[in-house]
Every structure is written in C-alpha cells, then in structure tokens.
Amino acid sequence: MDENNNIKLLKSHQSIPQVYIIGVGPGDPDLLTVKGQRIIATAEVILYADSLIPDRILQHTRPDAEIVKTSHQTLEQIVATIVDRVQAGLTIARLHSGDLTLYSAITEQIQALKSANIAVELVPGISAFQAAAAKLQVELTVPELVQTIILTRPTGRASAVPTAEDLASLAAHQSSLCLYLAARHVAIAQAKLLQHYPPETLVAICFRVGWEDEQIWVVPLTEMSVVTARESLIRTTMYIISPALAQIHSQKRDVPMSYRSQLYHPQHHHLFRPSV
C-alpha cells in the first residue's frame, strides 16, 4: 500500500488546542476525568448543554469564566460563539454529557471548527451505562454467559437508525444491550426485545444516573414498559437488558454465580503465573 495514501493522525503537540470538547460523564462531578476537571477549572469560556448536564459540574470553574447555556441554541449559534471567543484569544471548554463517542452530535461541531481553522482536542468521559453498571455492582461480560455489549438507540425525531441495526435484529444476540434515548418508545422497544430475550430477562431502568435524584429499577423484561409509564419517565433514561443482571438476584440470596473467569483460577497458568 502506498504510504502517501494513508490517513495520518496529527500529533497532539503539533497544534495547541483552542477548544476542548469534553465528555463530563453522566452527571456526578466526581466522575469527571482529572484532565476534564482541570480544563473546566481553567477555561475562560464554558459552553454546556444545560438540559443534560447538571449545574454542579461547573462548581469549580474560575470566578470570571463566561458560562454559556446551549440547550436552546442551534449548531450555527454555538459555533459562532466559539469562533468569536477564539478570535478574542480565549480558551473554550465545550461540555457534553456522558462520553463523546455516544450520541453527542460532536461530528458536525468538529467539522465546523476545523473549517474555521480552530484547533480542537477531545477529552473522553464516563458513559451512563458504565456508571449504571457500577451502581448495580454487576459485570456486563460474565464468562460463559455473555461476552458482548451492544450500545444502541431506537429511531427518534432527530436521528434515524439504519435498517440493519433494528432493535429486534440486535436483540437476537441476547447480549448485554444498553438502550439509550428509548423512554418515549419503550412499548415498541419492549416488543422487539421480547422477540429474542426470555420474558424473565432482567432489565435495569436507569433514570438520571449520576444526578442527585438518580433512580434505578430492576424488573423483568415484561414489566419494562409498565414501570416506565408508572414512573412517568420520558427522558434521561437508559435501559440495560442483560443475562448478567441475574448476578443481582444471586447477591441478594447470597448464592454464588456458577460462572467464573479462568483469569484468576488457581489451575490457570500464564506468563505472570507459570505452572510450578
């Protein structure tokens, strides 16, 4: 292959970032990365999606920082603000909830900023599914039970899901499935999931994970829609559907799971623990 045709990634030291796009996690300031927290504490301008990020994320900003809420703004307005502040020589932190790789709408922002010759750096964050699993004290990849995690969403007004990624076809894998942005479509989602998951499969319904009013319900798949409606959940809710959630019932009954990783088994030997 001709090396000249390869895409070469720019080294971070080749350009000094003027804008930092930061994943601030699900809402708990303690789950910010150290790097993200440092940038937020020193940035002169902070733009954040206030409908998805609690104000307490901003508790350590500098006193003179300009705080710009963006939930009511269009992409063009957000980019115009950033360009104006960069031209004034200011450092900008653009905050997104969760992690930037998931449903963050950063692609068009990055393209617009690069078109304006503005240097950008991305700082990853914790996703809601990771925070929820930690609260549930479960591993979503249990040996011999489930080894795959699928992160997906149903089709909504803002984004269409490709036909090949229809929820029913993904459910056929019976993996640990983390379903975002689905509360308004939960009845349809439940019907598609039940095409492949057993009815008794547990679902964790996770509302505002990482926020001060966080709530999590663990119910059979057949009750997923009923509980959502009963609790009037319409947004900031994600669902974890997984055979691995059976660990929760085992813990409550003090019954050990029958699945064990070989990694720490005394009969499993490897480079750092050779057979004697």
Image (tube, helix red, strand yellow):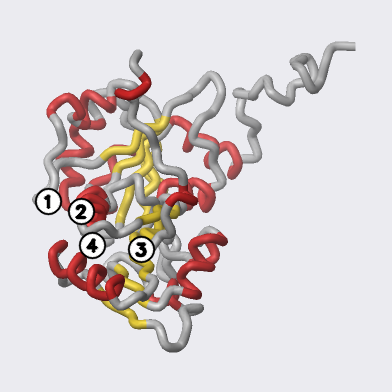
> In this rendering, which labeled residue sits more in front, label 2 or label 1?
2
Ranked by sequence position, the earlier of labels 2 and 3 is 3
Instruction: Report the amino acid beneath label 3.
Output: Val
Residue wearing tag 3: 19
> In this rendering, which labeled residue sits more in front, label 1 or label 4?
1
Q: Give the quarter of the image for residue 48.
A: bottom left
> In this rendering, which labeled residue sits more in front, label 4 or label 2?
2
The residue sitting at 83% across, 15% down in the picture is: 274
Structural crowding at the residue carrying mark 4, measured as other residues with C-alpha within 10 Å and reported as few (<14), some (14–19) or many (≥20): few
SS at circle 3: strand
Ranked by sequence position, the earlier of labels 3 and 4 is 3
Residue wearing tag 2: 115
The residue sitting at 46% across, 79% down in the picture is: 61
Instruction: Report the amino acid beneath label 1.
Output: Ala
Q: Give the quarter of the image for residue 264.
A: top right
- Viewer-proximal residue, 276 or 21? 21
Ranked by sequence position, the earlier of labels 1 and 4 is 1
Residue wearing tag 1: 158
Residue at the far bottom in the pictured view: 64
Q: Are marks 1 and 4 in contact (CB under 8 Å)?
A: no
The residue sitting at 30% across, 55% down in the picture is: 237
Ranked by sequence position, the earlier of labels 4 and 2 is 2
Find the distance from the CA under tag 4 to the CA under tag 2: 43 Å
SS at circle 1: loop
Instruction: Report the amino acid beneath label 4.
Output: Ser
| Image position of 60 with respect to 2: above or below | below
Residue wearing tag 4: 232
Q: Position of residue 168 (x, y in %)?
A: 21, 27
Q: Is residue 215 visible?
A: no
Find the distance from the CA under tag 1 to the CA under tag 4: 22 Å
Q: Quadrant of the N terminus?
A: top left
